[in-house]
Image (cartoon, helix red, strand yellow):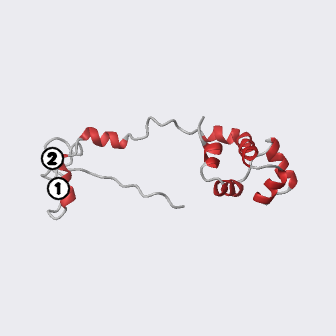
Amino acid sequence: MDHPARVVYVFADQDGMIPGALEAGQRSAQKFRPENVSAQMSGGFPFDTHQQILNRGDDVPRCDPHRIHREFPDRWRVYIRSNYQNLAHIQQVFGVSERTARKWWKGETGANGGHVAIAVNEHPVAAPRMLFAAE
């Protein structure tokens, strides 16, 4: 499974010290090379700004995936009824049987991942909002 790359920046003063990384008065074992201009220029990066960067998004409401799972058949029903005219239209777009289209229309079942992918392809903005957005 691919994971997104994570970049970590470490800022040091002009003497090669990493603030807070070692006990007071101890030197970093690894000093920056003179040719590392970006490291030399970043020595004055304020700690508060660094903390703000690390804490970005803390005030964003968290998504509860278990709640979305419980509500998914109803969310799917709302999405289906909002975007498709009738059972035949659902069958045509998703390639499902009349029985499955009927169950979706009534909200008895949700869809599997492949059908959600089709929905997102059909409605790239509306589908994710309707199916996954926290309310």
- Residue 23, image x and y in percent? 19, 42
Up-down relation of residue 122 to residue 102 (above or below)? below
Up-down relation of residue 57 to residue 31 (above or below)? above
The amino acid type found where label 2 is placed reads Gln
- Residue 86, image x and y in percent? 82, 49
> For the point 82% across and 51% down, which residue is it?
101
Up-down relation of residue 122 to residue 49 (above or below)? below
The disc label shown at residue 40, or none: 1
The amino acid type found where label 1 is placed reads Gln
Task: Looking at the picture, tell me which residue is in the foreground, 24 or 105.
Answer: 105
For residue 106, side relative to residue 79 (left or right): right
For the residues carrying marks 1 and 2, which lies nearer the camera in this image? 1
> For the point 81% across and 45% down, which residue is it?
105
Give the quarter of the image for residue 22.
top left
Q: Do labels 1 and 2 touch, CB within 8 Å? A: no
Mark 1 Cα-neighbour bin, 10 Å: few <14, some 14–19, many ≥20: some
Quadrant of the snapshot with the N terminus: bottom right
N-terminal-most mark, 1 or 2: 2
**Which residue matches tag 2?**
26
* Residues at marks 1 and 2, CA–CA distance in whole angstroms: 19 Å
Image label count: 2
Task: Looking at the picture, tell me which residue is in the foreground, 29 or 34.
Answer: 34
Task: Looking at the picture, tell me which residue is in the foreground, 10 or 100.
Answer: 100
* Residue farthest along the bottom direction in this orientation: 35
Circle 2 sits in a helix, a strand or a loop, which is it? Answer: loop
> For the point 79% across and 49% down, which residue is it?
85
* Residue farthest along the front direction in this orientation: 85
Quadrant of the snapshot with the C terminus: top right
The disc label shown at residue 93, or none: none
Task: Looking at the picture, tell me which residue is in the foreground, 36 or 99.
Answer: 99
- Residue 53, image x and y in percent? 34, 43
